[in-house]
């Protein structure tokens, strides 16, 4: 959360002239409901079902950039889909930096004020993120540099 997937995906889309779809936005538009409301009213498991359905719908159609939610890696079938259909890029950002970036954010129900809990979650997910085809270090890096590094990976 807060590594820059959505932000970088938009910039990459413009630079490469390839459409971008964000799974969080796709879910919010499909259900006309915010992620926060889905977590509150339906719970995380239902959100994860929506997330897998979104990924299944988006993979394997026309060429596109898919920016995902930070928890997409939790389900093995999601990781499998991404590997099968995509070039998977992990935007690494250290937890101190994402904590700063999201300090006033209210839209991510799992990102709590509890730094230790966020760190624990991030570390538990790291082995899954590391399965990506490419890892880009984004901590303290300007957005245009991140975009250029991704383009280099794709060449
Ligand atoms: N390289 C960067 N340098 C500084 N700020 C950044 C950088 N990348 C993203 N940000 C900022 O961090 C915040 C979170 O970025 P963004 O929403 O793109 O993260 P995300 O990875 O999509 O998060 P999530 O997993 O929750 O969807 C935004 O305010 C964004 O402007
Ligand atoms: O890392 C996560 O589990 C999440 C990240 C966000 O993108 C959203 O998908 C949601 O807030 C959950
Ligand atoms: Mg995002």
Image (cartoon, grey):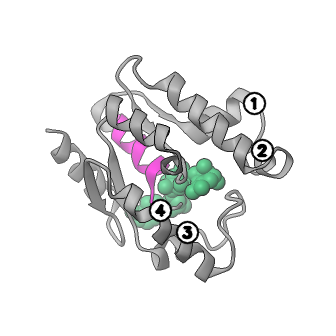
Where, by quadrant of the figure, is residue 91 drawn?
A: bottom left
Q: Circle 1 — which element?
A: helix
Where does the magenta region start and end? 3-14
Of badges 2 and 4, the one in the foreground is 4
Tell me if 49 is positioned left or right of 14 in this view: right
Distance CA(mark 1)–CA(mark 2) = 9 Å
Q: Horizontal and vertical percent for residue 60?
A: 39, 20
Q: In this view, does 76 lie above or below 58?
A: below
Mark 1, other Cα within 10 Å: few <14 / some 14–19 / many ≥20 = few
Q: Mark 3 points at which residue?
A: 121
**Residue extending furthest toward the right:** 41
Number of numbered tags placed on the structure image: 4
Mark 3, other Cα within 10 Å: few <14 / some 14–19 / many ≥20 = some
**Residue extending furthest toward the front:** 76
Q: Do tag 3 and tag 4 residues touch (Cβ < 8 Å)?
A: yes
Distance CA(mark 1)–CA(mark 4) = 27 Å
Residue 13 in magenta stretch = yes
């Amino acid at each position: 959360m807060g590594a820059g997937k959505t932000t970088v995906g938009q910039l990459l889309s413009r630079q490469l002239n390839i459409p971008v779809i964000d799974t969080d936005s796709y879910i919010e538009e499909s259900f006309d409901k915010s992620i926060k409301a889905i977590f509150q009213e339906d719970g995380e498991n239902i959100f994860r079902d929506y997330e897998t359905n979104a990924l299944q719908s988006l993979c394997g159609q026309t060429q596109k950039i898919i920016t995902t939610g930070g928890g997409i890696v939790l389900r093995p079938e999601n990781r499998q889909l991404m590997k099968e259909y995509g070039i998977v890029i992990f935007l690494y950002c250290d937890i101190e930096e994402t904590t700063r970036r999201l300090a006033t954010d209210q839209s991510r129900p799992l990102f709590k004020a509890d730094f230790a809990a966020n760190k624990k979650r991030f570390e538990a997910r790291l082995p899954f993120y590391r399965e990506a085809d490419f890892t880009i270090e984004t901590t303290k890096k300007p957005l245009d540099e991140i975009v250029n590094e991704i383009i280099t990976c794709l060449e």
